[in-house]
Amino acid sequence: MPVTTQQLIQWKQQGRAIVALTAWDYAIAQILDAAGVDLILVGDSMAVVLGYETTLPITLEEMLHHAQAVRRGVKRALVVVDLPFLTYQESVQQAMHSAGRVLKETGAQAVKLEGGHPAMLETVARLVQAGIPVMGHVGLTPQSVHQIGLRKQGKTQEQGERIFNEAIALEQAGVFSIVLEHIPAELALQITDKLSIPTIGIGAGPDCDGQVLVTSDLLGLTEKQPPFAKVYTNLRETITKAVEDYAVEVRDRQFPQNENPT
Ligand code: KIV
């Protein structure tokens, strides 16, 4: 059965942890979906594979292109797509246009946007009224990198209260789930206890209703992982070794051989 936004909320009520990962292409999406990942996020962390230093340059067209490929690889997981920087902050109309394109042109079921300030709450409420499921994202919001850096957020009482209040306000505005990124575990626990919708943590401790990682971090493909990521395998090394072995065999004229027919 395909995963729905209502299913995620039920899983929170049942205490069943939600497994989320990012995907940016068909092949990885297919693997994650077949492995039973519940929520696949086409995150604007895709900046990494496009060679950008931050998430800011990513365009809506790039997100649409990759989200279409991901969606083609997914049968069960809920697919959520990040709205990239300045494709939703200008006005409600701009957000409606961008989110509408994501749902219409990719087949994804929801969009994610960053922040919980009053203007964003109005945008969320209007998108939800229009039938567009929205996921929130508070704490470290990478699209604000030039204001807050990529540091842990919510370390002071004032910051913590602001993030807590943003999460509550986002739930009231209608989001079906919220990503809590790089905040103290205690704060994530307080938010998770308070909300009826599921929290999905990344660098936010063990008490969120689910966890998300950037898949290329988990696979050891990225050159440098954030401190909270766990590297489950080192594909960078595996790929380098395979490519070096291939290069040696080609230069030594050992590949192709009879078992590799023409
Ligand atoms: O862009 C992304 O991959 C994200 C996750 C880090 C939650 O927003």
Image (cartoon, grey):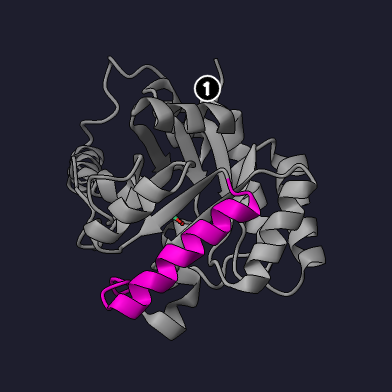
Q: Position of residue 159 (x, y in %)?
A: 36, 76
Q: Amino acid at mark 1?
A: Arg
> Foreground: 99 or 30?
99
Q: Which residue is mark 1?
A: 76
167 falls in the magenta region: yes
Q: Which residues are magenta?
A: 150-175
> Foreground: 34 or 171?
171
Q: Residue at x 28, y 55 (%)?
A: 204
Up-down relation of residue 34 to residue 47 (above or below): above
Quarter of the picture containing the N terminus is top right
Q: Position of residue 96 (x, y in %)?
A: 78, 57
Q: Residue at x 20, y 62 (%)?
A: 227
Q: Position of residue 2 (x, y in %)?
A: 56, 21
Q: Residue at x 23, y 52 (%)?
A: 205
| Label 1 crowd bin: few (<14), some (14–19), many (20+), radius 10 Å | some
Q: Farthest residue in the bottom direction? A: 147
**Ligand 1 in which quarter:** bottom left
Q: Position of residue 245 (x, y in %)?
A: 18, 40
Find numbered disc 1 in the image and state the secondary structure of the residue it sits on. Answer: loop
Which quadrant would residue 110 be assigned to in this image? top right
Quarter of the picture containing the C terminus is top left
Q: Residue at x 42, y 21 (%)?
A: 34
